[in-house]
Amino acid sequence: MAEFDRLSERIAWIDLSFVERDRTPRWAIEVGIRCHLAGMSLREVSKHLELFGIKRSHVAIHNWVHKADLQPISTVSEDQLAVDEKMIRLHGQKFWLYGAVDPQTNEILHVSLYPTANKQTTRWFLTELHQRYQLNNVEFLVDDADYLGPVLADDGYRFQIIRHGNRNAIERVFWEIERRTSSFANSFSNVALETAQNWLEAFAVYHNSRQT
């Protein structure tokens, strides 16, 4: 009973407004989403829910994560922001991950996935970041990434090249994303870019919930 009560507690960062029918208890949907984003595969989550009498397929759980449409929402706590670009593989296919992390809070502010990396995709990422957070006075912390440094320089942003210190936050985040994508590739059915992007944003929300 105590375990049921614990699982039944509301998870504030999951919005279940997408649920149209009460076929599945809402606490079970929340637990399913949280367990998957915490590291369990979709099939493992399905088996876990069976322990509580909830029988749902791994496809249903995937749909919960997708329909929840979780978006990282945070604030920039300081005047520095760590950004990076990195190639990752999903089912052997190359994608380029761009991310921004607040080095003081370790929160993910934004993640974007692109099928290629060049100056244009880099500008798209920076534009999305600016539209969301209005970063006029922020200094970007970058390493020797192929495109971020040159684009920041070309477009007049404040930045410094740094490989340690306050950049460690984003290095840890990218390492965790790589680990998760390689371990749980079934999160990305058919390697659809939209599906992978949706999962990354949901993971960012889960990650941020663990920083407080």
Image (cartoon, grey):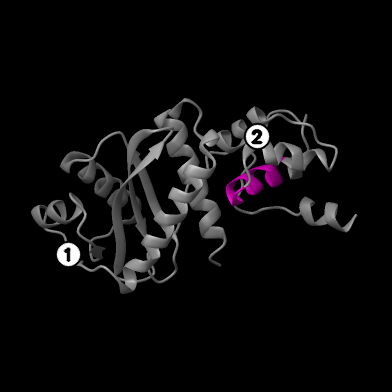
Between disc 2 and disc 1, the foreground one is: 2
In the rendered image, residue 105, in percent from the top left (x then y), is placed at: 44, 69
The furthest residue to the bottom? 165
| Residue for badge 2 | 61
Q: Is residue 35 magenta?
A: yes
Which residue is rendered at x = 76% and y = 54% of the image? Answer: 9
Name the mark on residue 27: none
Q: Is residue 145 left or right of residue 69?
A: left
CB atoms of marks 2 and 1 within 8 Å: no
Q: Main secondary structure of the magenta part?
A: helix
In primary-sequence order, the first of circles 2 and 1 is: 2
Amino acid type at mark 2: Ile
- Residue at image position (75%, 43%) is 48
Query: Looking at the image, can residue 72 be seen?
Result: no
Label disc, if present, on residue 158 of the rendered structure: 1
How dense is the environment of label 2, judged by Cα within 10 Å: few (below 14), some, or many (20 and up)?
many
* Element type at mark 2: helix
Q: Which portion, as a residue range, is magenta?
A: 29-39
The residue furthest right is 1
> Where residue 123 appears, x then y in whole percent?
20, 45
Q: Which one is in front, 144 or 152?
A: 144
Label 1 sits on a secondary structure element that is loop
Of the pair 149 and 24, the residue shown nearer to us: 149
